[in-house]
Image (tube, rainbow, N blue to C red):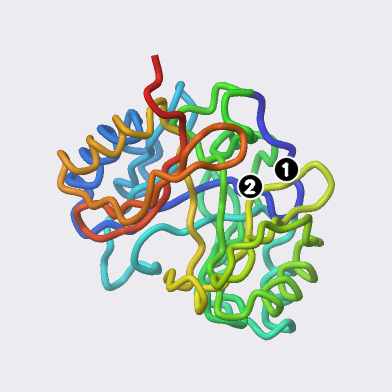
Amino acid sequence: MRPMPISEGTPVWFELNAGDPDAAQAFYEAVAGWHVAPSPMPEHGGYRIGAADGHPVAGIRQTTPEAPGFPGWAVYLATRDVDAAAGRVVELGGRVRFGPVDIPHVGRFAMVSDPQDVVFALLAATDPGESRAFGPVPLGTQPTLGHGVWIELATPDPAGAFAFYGALFGWEKLGAMPMGAMGEYAFIGRGDLRPGAVMSSAATGAPARWNWYIHVADIDAALATVRDSGGTVLQGPGPIPGGSYSANIADPAGNRLGLAGPRNAA
């Protein structure tokens, strides 16, 4: 899989704050097919990296009172200048939760939240062409198994979210699918970057948050593994454009994320 072009707002990393990193490692190795190992950099303090096809996809770190972080999964979005972007977040009505600070050998990041108080991270990587955490859709066009392939914002104010992320990253509304009483599933992006969608948390009942989806080889087999490993299937599998299926799950600690892939793969 070739690296995604790193433009403003490209998803470049995913990170789990885990109360029990050993249990999280076992679950995601089984469900996502990752190989999880400690970071080779001693400065990273035991941070664990989940890789697919030898490419880093996501991090798992121990939640501690001293460490910055928020429960569950965080989505990292690329920017060329974290300090400028963090300042822009505040100007647009959001908040800076932590940082900006440098991560040795990685880059500079900040944890922020949008005006609806949905948390995400900004990252200016030391090597901005290096991340392969996120791959293109539709599924099957690239070897994206185990990688992130979609991000999804559930927000109480979709119009406000479009205004905020449009001003921050240049994203636009690129069409939508009607969902009846649940509003619309509106696609986001700019140019060739079309990373995901926005929907109403008030209408759908979904928690207000950024979600991300991992590509799996067989959605039914993956959901069986979720259940066998102590997790919960929250929704799905349901059909998505392109012939694949998606589902939302919670790991044994209650951390939510999505899975996407075909049914009954050979």
Q: Is residue 243 above or below residue 121?
A: above
3D distance between C-alphas at marks 1 and 2: 10 Å
**Which class describes the residues within 10 Å of circle 2: few (<14), some (14-19), or many (20+)?**
many
Query: Where does the C terminus fall, quadrant-wise?
Result: top left
Give the labeled residue for mark 1: 6
* Mark with earlier residue (1, 2): 1
132 and 191: which is toward the camera: 191
**The quadrant where residue 140 appears:** top right
Q: Amino acid at mark 1?
A: Ile
Query: Where does the N terminus fall, quadrant-wise?
Result: top right
Q: Position of residue 11 (x, y in %)?
A: 61, 49
Residue 125: mark: 2
Q: Position of residue 168 (x, y in %)?
A: 75, 68
Q: Position of residue 238 (x, y in %)?
A: 45, 45
> Which secondary structure lies at badge 1?
loop
Q: Residue at x 58, y 39 (%)?
A: 134
Give the side of residue 127 with respect to residue 103, left or right.
Answer: right
Q: Is residue 181 above or below residue 198?
A: below
> Which secondary structure lies at badge 2?
strand
Q: Amino acid at mark 2?
A: Ala
Q: Residue at x 66, y 31 (%)?
A: 3
Q: Residue at x 47, y 27 (%)?
A: 145
Dots 1 and 2: beta carbons under 8 Å? Answer: yes
**The quadrant where residue 62 appears:** bottom left
